[in-house]
Image (cartoon, rainbow, N blue to C red):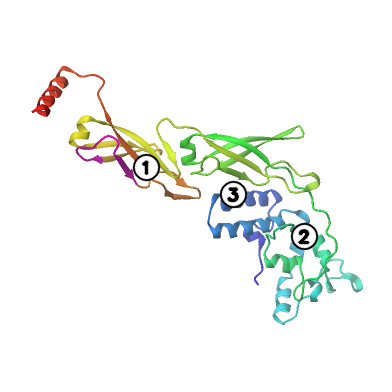
Amino acid sequence: MDFKDYYATLGVPRTASDAEIKRAYRKLARKHHPDLNPGDKAAEARFKEVNEANEVLGDPDKRRKYDELGANWRQYEQAEAQGRAPGGAGGWSGPFPGAGGAGGGAGNYRTMTPEEMEEMFGGSGGADPFSDFFHTFFGRAGGGEPQERGPRRARSKRGQDVESPVDLTLEEAFSGTSRRVVVKHDGHSRTVEVRIPAGVKDGARVRAAGEGEPAPQGGTAGDLFLTVRLLPHDRFERRGQDLYVKIPLPVTTAVLGGEASIPTLAGSSVRLKIPELTRSGRVFRLRGHGMPTVGKADDRGDLYATAEIAIPSKLSPEERKHYEALKTLAVE
């Protein structure tokens, strides 16, 4: 089992400040969150690694103890390779400031009990999100059967989650955007900027971890959730990842064929070849011009353009002359 370098997991140096660790965690948690990477097992695994690293480095006391014990990982590894559990069945054995024995100096060793492990890192509560390394090195016996544990200390309460609706235009959902949300608690308010990914759907919930209400007595803060509401568009209709648009065709283009300019939600246009004798209601498919998939900018839906024959609102004398001639031909 390899040593887990939590600093490397978050991409910060060991001298990183609490604020730098928090920023790194938020950035990675948002990038790899399962809600933004549906079905992506690699992103889910990475998300768990980031959370585990933050569980330790995000708490000053846990971080200090991790730094103290982390330097002795090689000793632990060597003991394990020799076929014995470091410290026996009771936990990890290694130098620790203030450990028992004469003098309590750096050369003295004692076994950390399960209760001390629990005191150091707490219980996981519910489904266990942590790796074997986390438990072996910090929270459970290094071999043998699991030991009985005493009563767990009460866990700190978690802050309340905050829900807020957010209205987006279809263009914003296509390109991605951000919103500033004011979170109020106990007479205080703060502004949180939340990044909304490209391709987000109507009704989706965008999570900003740790940006909800703070928890009492230093517990874990709640999360902020933005519920997306897509505003109707005057030209495009969204169905899943595909877009639909109606294109007016002059009678002459529909009958004789030609080209039509098809607008896209990206703001550009695509030239489409119209075959002769195109009927009203015919649908043309333009691959890759639909909505992007969340977290996969290059994976896009399609754009479907429906032809509508445009009847002129008025005729010039010359146009009327030609239509009259066409009518005569049609009768004959």
Q: Give the range drawn in magenta.
A: 273-286
Relative to residue 117, is residue 260 depicted above or below?
above
| Label 2 CA crowd tier, 10 Å (few <14, some 14–19, many 20+) | many
Which numbered mark, 1 or 2, is in the foreground of this view?
1
Identity of the amino acid at label 2?
Answer: Phe
First reached walking from the N terminus: tag 2 or tag 3: 3
Q: Residue 30 has which mark?
A: 3
Q: Give the CA separation, mark 1 to mark 2.
A: 52 Å
Quadrant in the picture for residue 61: bottom right
Which numbered mark, 3 or 1, is in the foreground of this view?
1
- In which quadrant is the C terminus drawn? top left
Q: Which residue is drawn at 26% across and 20% down?
A: 313
Percent x, y of residue 163: 65, 39
Identity of the amino acid at label 1?
Answer: Leu
Q: Is residue 128 visible?
A: yes
Q: Say which element carries label 1.
A: strand
187 lies left or right of 237: right
Residue linked to disc 2: 121
Relative to residue 127, is residue 107 depicted above or below?
below
Out of 63 and 216, give the one closest to the viewer.
216
Percent x, y of residue 291: 44, 43
First reached walking from the N terminus: tag 1 or tag 2: 2
Identity of the amino acid at label 3?
Answer: Arg
The reply to whether the C-beta atoms of the residues labelled 1 and 2 are less than 8 Å apart is no
